[in-house]
Image: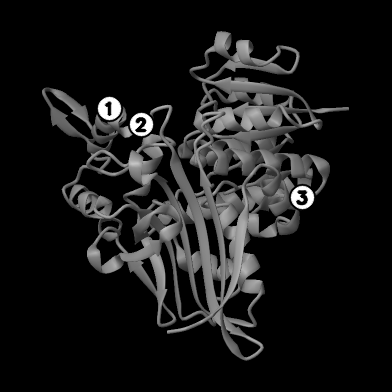
Amino acid sequence: MGKTILLLGYGMQGKCTLWDLMRSDLIDRVIVADKELDLETLYAKYPRDRVEGVVLDASDTRSTGELMRRADLVIELLPGRFAYQIAKLATDNGVHLVSSMYLANPGEQDEQRVEERKREVWELDATAKAKGITVLTEFGLDPGVDLVLSMLAIRELDSTSEFYSYGAGIPEPAAADNALKYKFTWSVEGVLRSYLRPAWIIRDGRAVEIRAEDVFAPEHMHMMDLPEIGGVVECYPNGNAVKYAEMFGIREMVQRMGRYTCRWPGHGAFWYGVAQSGFLSEEPVEVGGRTVSPLEFSMSLLGSQSQFWYRDDERDIAIVRVDARGYRAGKRTRIVYQLLDRRDLATGFTAMTRTVGFPVSAGAQMILRGDIAKRGVVMPVEVPADILLRELEARGLVIEHRVLPWED
């Protein structure tokens, strides 16, 4: 008997995920739920005996829980602030879940809240294990595929001295035609929130914190030449390398490590000034007798302009690259994995949409088939990498693998 999936969120990634699910013999029915859902357009594209559209506010836990109980698995593609709430609701209702988001807000700087969320996630993990539920989290592109490739690279070395990972979603050079050299392929809110969160790197074996306001500072950025996409990109620290060093089991040996996001040159200098000037703050200010947060204003300003969105004939590029350096059989060795994808103009799906939507769909099907048998909160590094890479390749996402000498 085929399976039923509840797809929460029908934005750019959600549309790609549904398209992929509809090509699976494993899936009988998908319930698509979103706060703003055009049912007429949905039913014009997909048959009603396989797809059911529901207008839903995900903050309505009663209605969301009722829908969950009709499904074998939930795919959550909502704004990041919903991630933990939906994961807990799915676990309470005894349903597997896949999400591309973090259960804990990586931008949270209140230590008490950080500790509270850690405890909540631990309790969620225990409950999911007791109920035989898998909560597969951070399973998109970055985080997600990058973590899988990271473990593959590290396992090829006897010891790891340096480790760098990169993620990028940028326009092709011809489409980088605005002042920011950037266009949105996912939530404007998600992008701007990611621009104001602290980062941690490892330097000379020591953990180094970079303040949220300083991630775009020149001293924290470096350049990387990627001739395969047409030029040099700038790379700024994004995320907690210390956390992942511990997850990968290399914290005690690695001397230098960082996680970076890439943009076309000049992007970082603009956002450094913006962050330093308070435009990404959530603290409200009064404007004409009304209060509004600078972040909300910035999101509305950029999101309302067509110059920051892709035209139908423009392509974006999505990249994940991991670069592990250490020793293998006594020789200095580099292991490089890279996924590079471009927009599919035939379907209209952007590269960023494909590299999030396809892994999420693949992860859901791997759980339902039993390829992912672990229960509780499951990270990408715990997923069978060989099966996932085959699933991605079948969808046109090809991973390049190189073994190189490690030269200074």
Q: In this view, does 254 lie to the left or right of 306?
A: right
User: Residue 41: x and y, percent?
Assistant: 56, 12
Check whether the beta carbons of the residues at disc 2 and disc 1 lie within 8 A of each other: yes
Label 2: which secondary element: loop
- How far apart in space, not on screen, are marks 2 and 1 (Cα)? 8 Å
Label 3: which secondary element: loop
For badge 3, the amino acid type reads: Ile
Mark 3 Cα-neighbour bin, 10 Å: few <14, some 14–19, many ≥20: some
Residue at 42% x, 60% y is 226
Residue linked to disc 3? 372
- How far apart in space, not on screen, are marks 2 and 3 (Cα)? 36 Å
Front one among 290 and 372: 372
User: In the image, which is nearer the foreground, mark 1 or mark 3?
Assistant: 1
User: Residue 202: x and y, percent?
Assistant: 42, 74
User: Residue 363: x and y, percent?
Assistant: 69, 44
Label 1: which secondary element: loop
Residue at 64% x, 55% y is 380
Which label is found at residue 309?
A: 2
Residue 251 appears in the figure? no
